[in-house]
Image (cartoon, helix red, strand yellow):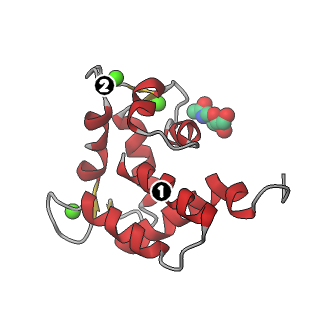
Amino acid sequence: MLAIVLVCSLAAVNAANPPPDIRKYMDVSFATYDHSPLDGLVEENEWDATISREDLDHDTCVTLKEYLVVHTCPKAADLFRHYDHNNDSCLKVADMSEEFHLIDHSGDNVVSLQEWEQYFFQLTNKLFAHLFQGPGVGR
Ligand SMILES: *[C@@H]1O[C@H](CO)[C@@H](O)[C@H](O)[C@H]1NC(C)=O
Ligand SMILES: [Ca+2]
Ligand SMILES: [Ca+2]
Ligand SMILES: [Ca+2]
């Protein structure tokens, strides 16, 4: 999932040197999802389609193993667990759908750029808080 790649690359960038233009990374990511239709919104079909790309053996379940083939950032396993809403160790369309409705804050079944930025900025902060703070701070 590109969003996860995005979160990973943001963490890498932030750990070294917090950039003033996080929003630019978010916007590039959003644009790569928004293609069918290209309408300035991310629809659920655009979001859910990431599952079929990552399901390497096409059994409808993206396992942690498959996931780690595609995503090699240090927090990839934590991100996998974040997306696996029903804790069955499989990322499925149902997990992605649940995640989509979290991102869709207004509940109108489409994700605007503003909702996207807000959600992934919060998710990045939540998952990588200790990297932002540096060693010895907090837990
Ligand atoms: C999945 O696990 C998380 C963390 O352990 C927990 O908060 C959540 O309630 C669990 N969800 C389900 C559907 O079991
Ligand atoms: Ca779209
Ligand atoms: Ca699979
Ligand atoms: Ca699952």
Which residue is at 51% across, 24% downward?
88
> Crowdedness of circle 2 by 10 Å Cα count: few (<14), some, many (20+)?
some
Q: Give the label, 2 or 1, closer to the camera.
A: 1
Q: Dots 2 and 1: beta carbons under 8 Å? A: no
CA separation, marks 2 and 1? 27 Å
Mark sitting earlier along the chain (2/1): 1
**Residue at the disc numbered 2:** 60
Circle 2 SS class: loop
Farthest residue to the left: give it.
37
At which x and y percent is residue 61? 36, 25
Instruction: Identify residue type, mark 2.
Output: Thr
Which residue is at 48% across, 56% downward?
9
- Of 61 and 99, nearer the camera is 61
Q: Within 8 Å of ligand 3, the CB of disc 2?
A: yes
At which x and y percent is residue 128? 64, 55
In the rendering, which numbered label is found on residue 9? 1
Residue 63, quarter of picture: top left
At which x and y percent is residue 36? 15, 57
> Crowdedness of circle 1 by 10 Å Cα count: few (<14), some, many (20+)?
some
Instruction: Identify residue type, mark 1.
Output: Ser
Q: Is residue 44 above or below residue 120?
A: above
At which x and y percent is residue 62? 38, 28
- Of 119 and 69, nearer the camera is 69
Q: Is residue 53 above or below residue 30?
A: above
Which residue is at 50% across, 35% downward?
84
